[in-house]
Image (cartoon, rainbow, N blue to C red):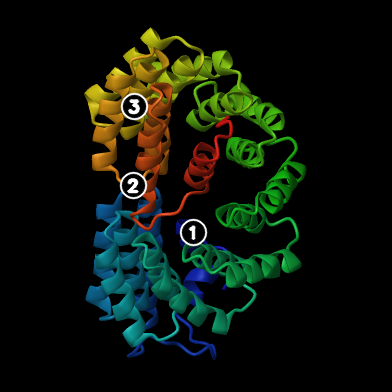
Amino acid sequence: MGSTFSGSRVNDKMNVDAMMMGETGDPISEPTIDTASTNEISELSKKGYAKMKENNIAGAVEDFKAILEIEDNNNYALVGLGDSERKRGHFKDAIDYYTKCLSYHPGNNYALFGLADCYKALNQYHKAIEIWEQYLVHDDRNITVLTRVADAYRKIRDFKKSKQLYLRVLEMEDTNAYAVIGLGHLHYDFKEYKDALYYWTKMLELNPGNVDIRVLTSIGNCHRKLKTFDQGLIYFQKALDIDPKNFYALFGMADCYRGMNQQFRSVEYWNKILDIDPRNKVILTRAGDAYRNMGDYKVAADYYNRAMDIDFDIYAALGLALICKGEGKYDEAIDRLSALIRDDPKNYRLYIDLADCHIKKNQKSKAIEVLQAFQRQGLRSQAVNDMIDRLENNRPLF
């Protein structure tokens, strides 16, 4: 078996013939059939996979079922039918075919591979891992399978096993893109942004003349998380040079400018996203925040209300309350924030903003009472603790 699998494998007669052989090289299809039938099965299988490659799945199914009329439980046919259903997204039907094949032909690598991919597609990663590890018993240096197992361990958040397998692949092939990218994702998922940055930057070195936009945005996101926003801008801009409408690049540009407190630049990119997706509630709220921080309350309120018209959004509702506070409408802000606390009693930020409204009205005792109400729920927030301490000891709040 080779290290890669694809629908074109039937064009290679050696691969097709290999499916007829067991681990010892003996035929695994029982009972033995005549040479003419064997040749017919081989041709039908080739036709079936050729049709599948052309996306003629119905035609492929006909060819594979024709094989079963020649030989019951033929491994060509059962794997082919499994592959056909898998390509159509009928994963449970594909599982039935692969499982049936394995019941008659234990250890059939194509059936094992297809079965594992089905479980992966169904997000049943533990089952997929179990099957891929069965495959590795027969071929423990198959890079395609090793990277898939590493990916699956990453999905179930087993950092140690995932990293071990990715590194094992790199020991065999130090420029393997799947392993390098996988390590980038793995470290990013576990908030190890500097390590993730190392691997994604390595991808640029491996493919200097063919830059993948997803690698550029991933590097940008690492800088965003590390708060090296000026460096993030460089990579997000490179991504936009490739695709001016890429959501992740536009979002990254806007968020980096937000982090640099250049709100006037961030709204430029929030609005570019809204030109493409005008009903994106999250982006409407982000744009509202930017305009509010610039002191343009009228425009900010328009964005928040547009978000609220789509569906209730606590951040848009909070933004409207903060506009009231910014305009000195403390009673209205208190009403809005109190209503939000009733719906979201564990959100510490709401208590801090509500307490601040009472402070603005010279109601220090009420502000302390609001903050203590948060603490009485058994919740912890350093920001709340610090604010109470400053109020009780008459120290400046900010």
Looking at the rendered structure, the kind of residue marked 2 is Ala
Residue positioned 56% across, 83% down in the render: 138
Say which of 69 and 384 sits in front: 384
Residue positioned 73% across, 49% down in the render: 198
In terms of sequence position, does the residue under pointer 2 or pointer 3 come before the other?
3
What residue would you read off at disc 3? 316
Say which of 191 and 341 sits in front: 341
Q: Secondary structure at mark 3?
A: helix
Q: Is residue 309 left or right of residue 329?
A: left
Q: Is residue 109 left or right of residue 281?
A: right
Looking at the rendered structure, the kind of residue marked 1 is Ser
Residue positioned 37% across, 43% down in the render: 347
| Alpha carbon distance from label 1 to label 3 | 48 Å
| Alpha carbon distance from label 2 to label 1 | 61 Å
Q: Secondary structure at mark 2?
A: helix
| Alpha carbon distance from label 2 to label 3 | 24 Å
